[in-house]
Amino acid sequence: MEIGCGSGKNAINIAKKLKNSKIYSFDFSQSMIDLANKNKKLNKIKNINFFVYDVLNLNQIKKKYDIVISKRCLINLSNFREQINVINTIANVLKKNGLFLMCENSSVGLKKINDLRKQIKLEDNINTLKLINKINVNSNYYFLSRILNAYIAKKEKKSVNYNSELNKLALLLPEDLVKNFSQGVIWLWKNNK
Ligand SMILES: C[S@@+](CC[C@H](N)C(=O)[O-])C[C@H]1O[C@@H](n2cnc3c(N)ncnc32)[C@H](O)[C@@H]1O
């Protein structure tokens, strides 16, 4: 099964190589599925079933597959939580020992490029805008509440109290005392042109 198949070119290439396979490929865009079916016909492919479906509803699929493929589909989901939820659901539609092939963009490579460019004094990749401020919102709070408070609750075999004094203290401390634990970041850019 392929999620977010777009024009169907990946499924068509696989179908040509693995003639005995049965491929189910979906996309939530009707126009993409129309295009994929057109390409399927042009390539005289029989073993693919293209259909319209939203990957966010994957938990409603009861069938199990040998392989699930995502090529630049997960990157379109609106946030990391949604991506993780879909990845967890993929585990449920895989047969035992089934494989999930995930070809997606990674922010790690982009960060390394930007860090190295900065070190050797190359311009920022977003070169018309200059970053003038970056705020990690409530970084202290996330560190104290999600790590310390949660850890103490676990050790004391209690459920996590989100109104704990530790959490309240976190909101009183200077912003960014504990750095880079926030889930929300505010970037302020200035147009220098
Ligand atoms: C960047 S394209 C990649 C298409 C194809 N996988 C490829 O590699 O050429 C992303 C595709 O994911 C589809 N898509 C985005 N969100 C989706 C969702 N929630 N459910 C199903 N498809 C989705 C888009 O319609 C689009 O066709």
Image (cartoon, helix red, strand yellow):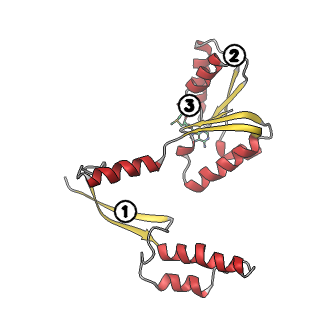
- Is residue 63 visible in this depiction of the protein? yes
- Of residues 140 and 28, which is closer to you in this image? 140
Q: How many marks?
A: 3
Q: Amino acid at mark 2?
A: Lys
Q: Residues within 10 Å of mark 1 (few under 14, many from 20)?
A: few
Crowd around label 2: few <14 · some 14–19 · many ≥20 (10 Å)? few
Callout 3: helix, strand or loop?
loop
Residue 129, given in percent of the width and then of the height, sits at: 27, 54
Residue 43, x across and y down, in percent: 59, 13
Q: Is residue 161 above or below residue 26?
A: below
Q: Secondary structure at mark 1?
A: strand
Residue plotted at (53% across, 38% down) = 72
Label 1 beta carbon less than 8 Å to ligand 1: no
Residue at the (53%, 41%) spot, across then down: 104
Q: Quadrant of the N terminus?
A: top right
Q: Earlier in the sequence, mark 1 or mark 2?
A: 2
Q: Which residue is mark 2?
A: 19
- Quadrant of the image occupied by residue 148: bottom right
In the structure shown, which secondary structural element does the residue marked by tag 2 occupy? loop
Residue that label 1 marks:
187
Tell me whether the residue at label 3 lies in contact with that at label 1, contact meaning CB atoms closer than 8 angstroms. Answer: no
Q: CA distance from mark 2 to mark 3?
A: 21 Å
Query: Taking 10 as reference, is 102 above or below it?
Result: below
Q: Name the residue: 59% across, 24% down.
A: 36
> In this rendering, would 163 be left or right of 117?
right
Residue named by callout 3? 6
Pointer 3 residue Cβ closer than 8 Å to ligand 1? yes
What amino acid is labelled 1 in the image? Trp
